[in-house]
Amino acid sequence: MRRVLFTCLIVPLAILSGCSSNTVKTTQVVPVMQEQAAIPEAELLDVGIHLFDPGLEDANDDDQVVFPEIRKAESRFIPYHLMQTLQSSAAWGAVRVIPNSQNNVDVTVKGQILQSDGEQLRIVVHVMDATGNEWYEKEYEGLASKYAYTKRRNSAVPNEPFQSLYNQIANDMLRYRRENFASADLQKIRTIAELRFAQSFSPAAFGGHLKETSKGEYEITRLPAEGDPMLDRIRQIRERDYLFVDTLQDYYGGFVKDMDQPYQEWRGQSYNEVIALRELKRDARNRTIMGIAALIGGIAAAGGDHGSTRAAGTVAVAGGAYMIKSGFDKRAESEMHVEALQELGDSLEAAIEPQVIELEDRTITLSGTVENQYEQWRELLREIYQVDTGMQ
């Protein structure tokens, strides 16, 4: 009897011994590398950050903490914070969040959200320049401290739990630029970006200045004459385009500002729910394992010859059945946490309504149609260019 009871107890405990879990209690923030030397204007690369892919199509169907409303909001929130981080490095020219249809920028950053639940943020970032040269593609991961979502003592102090992740991206971009480009290379990137913009407005006039290689990279075949009036008009058009994109920064900034408080609250609660969900699943699994082990041992003991052994086996069977039921109850409780996360996502979506911005000659509503609005703006610029030059 003792041997049977010992088996009933020791098997579950042995199984449980390898089922511990850890929570990140602290995080070390990687500082942003600063550019100390002054960069000549001709070598100062502008950076355009596309709105991130929310990653909804690639999300695992079993991932119960992916909410489309949250991911779509994060696809704007993350690029904006990355923009602010790159600006703080003093290593670049103008850094902007740009519509995804805008590709004629010195350096373009694209990204996709792989995981974001308050506890962990995983994204993949792809960086390339106007020549078509791909700098790198890399996955970044950040873990939030359990203290990251405590109430801020001073609301004026930024509180981004994953700031270290943004800093790592900024540092990697700066290192790549320093290690791979000489002065002439940087100037070439800027020239090709301008010529690609010119080509998009007037292929007839500027199509012969660039050629695209079989690798999808651009090379300069000839340069426009300095003082070319058509190039001067293109530069004026490009400045107008920059003004429009700068106006979009106000929209993105307002969006992030309005989103910040409910989003931080959602992430804080999501962090707690994710931790609780994992603990509940672990607890439910362990309870079920212990219950099954107890049932097996109890059934074996109940079939014994000794009366006391059979009695102990009956008790073990009853206890095992209770533990299995307890495990199922824990699973049901975990489903309640998932529903709580869904409600939080719905409340965040309601708190981030689209905004309206005023331009010089029109009012534009920016909701999910920024790309369409930008395309309309580019068509207007083409009309202006054609009128100015008489070209069709």
Image (cartoon, rainbow, N blue to C red):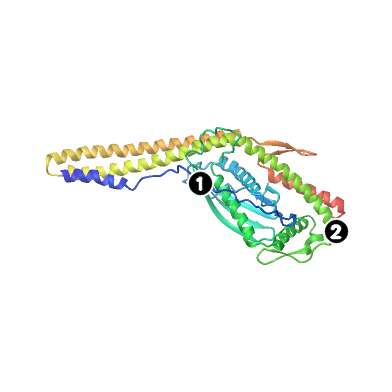
- Direction left: furthest residue: 306
Q: Secondary structure at mark 1?
A: loop
- Residue 56 seen in the current view: no
**Residue 168 drawn above or below residue 264:** below
Residue at left offset 64%, top offset 49%: 89
Which quarter of the picture shows residue 5? top left
| Residue in the foreground of this view, choosing between 5 and 144 | 144
- Direction front: furthest residue: 36
Q: Badge 1, how many Cα within 10 Å: few under 14, some, many 20+?
A: few
Q: CA distance from mark 1 to mark 2?
A: 53 Å
Q: How many marks?
A: 2
> Please, what is the three-letter code of the amino acid marked with disc 1?
Gln
Label of residue 28 in the image: 1
Quadrant of the frame with the C terminus: bottom right
Q: Badge 2, how many Cα within 10 Å: few under 14, some, many 20+?
A: few
Q: Earlier in the sequence, mark 1 or mark 2?
A: 1
* Left or right of residue 273, residue 156 in this image: right
Q: Secondary structure at mark 2?
A: loop
Which quarter of the picture shows residue 245? top right
**Residue 44 drawn above or below residue 297:** below
Label of residue 298 in the image: none
Q: Position of residue 173 (x, y in %)?
A: 61, 55
**Closer to viewer: mark 1 or mark 2:** 1
Residue at left offset 33%, top offset 43%: 286
- Residue 339 seen in the current view: yes
Q: Which residue is mark 2?
A: 228
Which quarter of the picture shows residue 178? bottom right
Q: Position of residue 14 (x, y in %)?
A: 28, 47
Q: Position of residue 1 (x, y in %)?
A: 15, 43
> Please, what is the three-letter code of the amino acid marked with disc 2?
Asp
| Residue in the foreground of this view, choosing between 125 and 374 | 125
